[in-house]
Image (cartoon, rainbow, N blue to C red):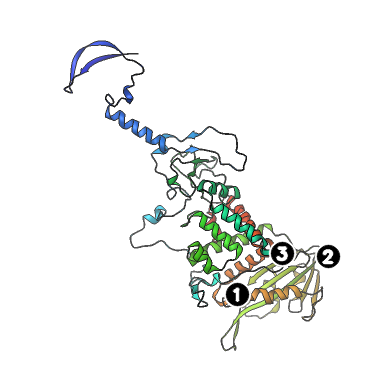
Amino acid sequence: MRAAVQKSYSKTGRYTNAPTENIEINDDDDDFNDEDYMPLAKRKALMSKNKEKKESPVVTPVAASKKSPKAETPVKIPAVVAKVRPSEASSIGGLCLNNAAPAAVKDAPAGKTKEVVDLTKDDGGKAAADSREITFNKLQGKTYPSLVVVARPSLKVKENAQSDRGTLDTKVKSVLTYPTTKFTEWLIQQGLVRSAQTCQIHADTALKLGMYSDSSKFPYSGGYVWISSCCPTRYVSVFNASIFEGSVHPPSVILKLIYHWACQTNVPNVVQWVKVDNLYVKGIYTFLRAVCTVALYYHITLLGGPGKKIEVGVISLGTTTQDGQQRQVKVEVLGVYDPEGKLIRLRAIEPYTGPDKNNKKRFERILEPLKEWVNRDSIILTDLTVDKGCLHTLGFKTVHQALPSDSSRNSNATIMDYLRRIVPRMFQNTLSLLSRAIIQQFLDELVWREWYGTSPGLAFDNIVAHLAEQTRLDHKASLTGRLNK
């Protein structure tokens, strides 16, 4: 290789004219890497190039099972991405830990704090039920009314129902000891975080799951982050569109709370062991009750069928003044029970307050859910307090009304016992402090536990499965936003 030299460089640092001559340059004499002859501009360029190479993420496949997929050639991200300083807090749908808040919050005027959203707030803007901590007993101290309510299943619970608690404990403890990379892979396998993402700007473009070389940028995912070639400067967190999105606690904390919710651990112990406050526990538990409600809507089919018996009962839940003189109805509860499958449905209805104290109008409102719950060819077993004409109007042709003292198979004795014994016990000391919407949330949780959570192990596995179903759904709103509605 030859080069023509027009000027020579003297020791004084000045260029001097010299005759043109051909100089032979050896290939193994690398001026670019020789600091004695490397210009400062080239040296800076080399340092920048090495730094970009160090920080560039590499796309790697996630092991979905023990059998690792065929090795793929790592794909390096374009150099333009290295100029972006990504992190968990700045990524789309990421966590908000270590004072890392979204830009909108960071830019807020001084002195203003981020607004806390009460997940159990009623519509209407009035003082929300369950929004203040109250002292129920000296041992428990101040807490939110909803954290006192416990929905315990009883219809299918066996004596050895707690036997799977030990298995569940071992399983969860093992997962919590995983390195962050393996823990993230477990969340993906369970469906608690998505296994596929698409670009929010280019909806037809699938994102690639990358591993960022500097895992400290994404410490809670072990370096995993979603990237794309269409928008190389946009990093999408693996926690985007999941229950972990925007969390101020690590994903492991939320997993612990899911575990304690499934086991129905005493809330003061949860607060002490998991190191979170009552408000955060209340928020996560509200999310889980919302998952129960959605699961009932999607999975429960019509009860009964041609010739099959279905028990129907109604009770009024109310509060009484301290002197016992005045009683006010808070909600009316409709209960439906399938004795063959030991399956139940419950609905809380606002008491009828119309000017006309018409019993028929009252029961039209109360019994309306039966259209969606029960097969019209079923045999309805109820008592004399329920309006028989309303049941006929709803399309139920065969209706048997039993006397209150009748406890035979052709009565609604089982559902009435459940409504009088199990349901009121749930809301002891808290009924007046909760709204109808929150009462319904707990009734949905109770029904869900009777169907899917009769033991801690079943409750954990099924709430994870039902939460994964909602995580997979594509929706404009975030998962936590949907669960809050």
**Quadrant housing residue 296:** bottom right
Residue 66: where, in percent of width, then height? Answer: 62, 42
The amino acid pointed to by label 3 is: Trp
The residue at 34%/33% (across/down) is 47
The amino acid pointed to by label 2 is: Gly
Residue 56: where, in percent of width, then height? Answer: 43, 37
The amino acid pointed to by label 1 is: Phe
Residue 97: where, in percent of width, then height? Answer: 43, 55
Closer to the eye: label 2 or 1: 1
The residue at 67%/74% (across/down) is 422
Residue 110: where, in percent of width, then height? Answer: 33, 60
Measured in 3D between alpha carbons, the distance from the residue under mark 2 to the one under mark 1, in whole angstroms, is: 35 Å
Element type at mark 2: loop
Toward the left, the furthest residue is 12
Residue at label 2?
307
Element type at mark 1: loop
- Graded by Cα atoms within 10 Å as few (under 14), some (14 to 19) or many (20 or more), the crowding at tag 2 reads few
- Graded by Cα atoms within 10 Å as few (under 14), some (14 to 19) or many (20 or more), the crowding at tag 3 reads some
Element type at mark 3: helix
The circle drawn on residue 373 is 3
Toward the right, the furthest residue is 307
Residue at label 1?
427
- The residue nearer to you, when weighing 168 against 301, is 168
Determine contact: label 2, label 1, CB under 8 Å: no
The residue at 74%/76% (across/down) is 387
- The residue nearer to you, when weighing 190 against 439, is 190
